Image (cartoon, rainbow, N blue to C red):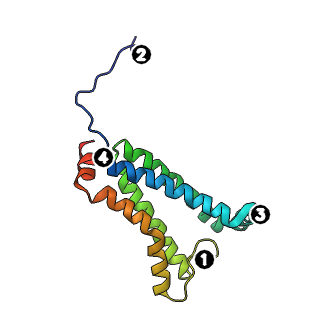
Amino acid sequence: MGLLKKSRLTHARPNVPALVQVAALAIIMIRCLDVLMILNTLGARGIGEFIHRSVQTWNLTLVFLSSLVLVFIEIYCAFSLVKGRNWARWVYLLTQITAASYLWAASLGYGYPELFSIAGGSKREIFHALVMQKLPDMLVLLLLFAPASSRRFFRLQ
């Protein structure tokens, strides 16, 4: 019976560095706070109107569902980071590049700015607002890629 057999690891797994734990927790908390802030800002009626407006056309529905999928991918990456999965930090980096690129393009008038955009009078103001909005995510990426302990942890896994 193979079910009762204990499997042994041939080598010890290193402990998760505190910076990686902080980064994973920060990803989860940032996304949860984003959702709570949207719920607080829009309210129940506003959420209903937002969903109704975002399913008017197939393109808007695709953008709306893609943003939800992106959030779930980011949260999945956070849990995978603690397990030492190197691909998770690269996928998280890719999600941030995708989100920032879409926000930048939508804010400049490409895509659907009524759904996801940043208000601003000029490109410089929009860029400044985008950087300020993405600053927590950039700090998380810094925690995952810059410290030697984080890089070593992902290399050893």
Secondary structure at badge 4 equals loop
Mark sitting earlier along the chain (4/3):
4
For label 1, count other residues whose C-alpha is less than 10 Å away and answer few (under 14), some (14-19) or many (20+).
Answer: some
Secondary structure at badge 2 equals loop
Q: Is residue 9 left or right of residue 130?
A: left
Mark sitting earlier along the chain (2/1):
2
The amino acid pointed to by label 1 is Pro
Secondary structure at badge 1 equals loop
> Could you tell me which quadrant the N terminus lies in?
top left
Counting every numbered tag in the picture gives: 4
For label 2, count other residues whose C-alpha is less than 10 Å away and answer few (under 14), some (14-19) or many (20+).
Answer: few
Mark sitting earlier along the chain (4/1):
4
**Residue that appears at 28% across and 41% down:** 157
Indicate which disc residue 113 carries.
Answer: 1
Q: Which residue is mark 2?
A: 3
Q: Comparing marks 4 and 1, which lies closer to the viewer?
A: 4
Secondary structure at badge 3 equals helix
Q: Nearer the viewer, residue 71 or 144?
A: 144
Confirm or deny contact between disc 1 and disc 3 (CB under 8 A). no
The amino acid pointed to by label 3 is Arg
Mark sitting earlier along the chain (1/3):
3
**In the rendered image of this protein, does residue 115 appear above or below residue 157?**
below
Q: Is residue 35 left or right of residue 132?
A: right
Q: Is residue 47 visible?
A: no
Q: Name the spot of residue 126 as percent of width and height, x first.
A: 50, 82
For label 3, count other residues whose C-alpha is less than 10 Å away and answer few (under 14), some (14-19) or many (20+).
Answer: few
Mark sitting earlier along the chain (2/4):
2
The amino acid pointed to by label 2 is Leu
Q: Name the spot of residue 69 as percent of width and height, x first.
A: 55, 55
Residue at the limit of the structure toward the top, as seen here: 1
Q: Which residue is mark 4?
A: 17
